[in-house]
Amino acid sequence: MEKVKKKGSNTMPKIASLLLAIALWAFVAYQDDTERTGWFRDIPITVIGSDALSEAGFYVTGTSRTSIDVKLRGNRTALSRVETDDISVTLDVSDIHREGDTAVVCEVSASPNNIDVVSTRYGTVTVSAEEIVTDIYPISVRVVGSPAEGYSVFDTVLSNNEITVRGPKSIASTVASVATKSVSVSGVTQSGSVSVGLTAYDAEGNSISGVTFEPSTVEVSYNVLREKTVPLKISLSNIPYDKDVTYSPTTIKVYGSADALAGIDALTSAPLDVSGAENGDILSVSLNVPEGLRLQNDGNAVEITVNVKKLKNENTNEVLPDGQG
């Protein structure tokens, strides 16, 4: 009887042939590591030398590009491992010494030692520069919030009353005023000081960026005093016999320490001549303000409004004409 051959008797030779082919391909591929070139696109540009340019009196306002393409050369394995972060593109602006546009060539390097830079695309970049100018401005203080009830803030003082503003001519020329950043006095009960930055504004009150301040911060100090409302006693003199003269307001706020305020019940004035006063006149009056206390303004004078009424004739109940008794 003839024996039947088993299926799959050629399997092992076929597997061996396949493994040999794979090994041969891997060997050839490994040996095929010849030098090649490749493009790497949109490599970001890093601008350097801005500080030196600023010291020279200029400022970069823009560049024609923010990235370029770079062509590298190296063996196939090394080239395949290059990442974008391995490529450095710098734009040195330190040698620019004029306004307007200047063409600057980017400097390119690759960190793997066995990789060379062949060429670039868009490697020459146009840099726009502008002259830096300076000017001096007064500073206003921006106080926000309210102190605790029964207290008021006085004597806001700056360590510098003026500030030097520095920046590109096109930006610095729009500055109209400079103010401190917000100084909050919300809920305060005692004097204090704070270091704050500054903000520049244009004529419409919009904040401006792109300028610097010298110094960059200022010290703001403020005085917090207790307040008390007391009667206002005005000494009226030379009141016409046929007129009744009164005034308003009849109370006033005074400010000071708790001890100083405890010793006062009213504020009086020097004699005020009202012989020629007419109804509705506003008169300035000097008050006797004890030491250690102060008014809302910086002096001791306040303004009052006088109310003048003619008296009636006792016999006729008619109002007396001016100058008659």
Image (cartoon, helix red, strand yellow):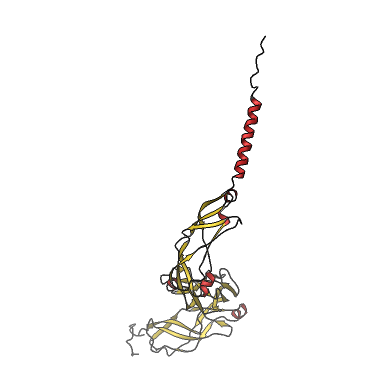
State the quadrant of the N terminus.
top right
Q: Residue at x 40, y 84 (%)?
A: 244
Given residues 105 and 212, the one toward you in this image is: 105
Q: Can you give x and y, in whole percent of width and height, for residue 14 in the image?
A: 63, 28
Residue 53 place in picture, x, y as percent:
51, 72
x, y percent for residue 259: 62, 79
Which of the pair 192/202 is nearer the observer?
202
Q: Is residue 29 above or below residue 272?
A: above
- Viewer-proximal residue among 275 and 142: 142
User: Picture coordinates of residue 278 (x, y %)?
Assistant: 37, 84
What residue do we see at 58% from left, 73% from top? Answer: 195
- Does 133 sit left or right of 10 as displayed? left
Q: Which quadrant of the figure has residue 290?
A: bottom right
Relative to 243, 162 lies left or right: right
**Considering depth in this image, is 74 or 295 the residue closer to the camera?**
74
Q: Is residue 284 above or below residue 119?
A: below
- Residue 128 in sight here: yes
* Residue 309 figure quarter: bottom left
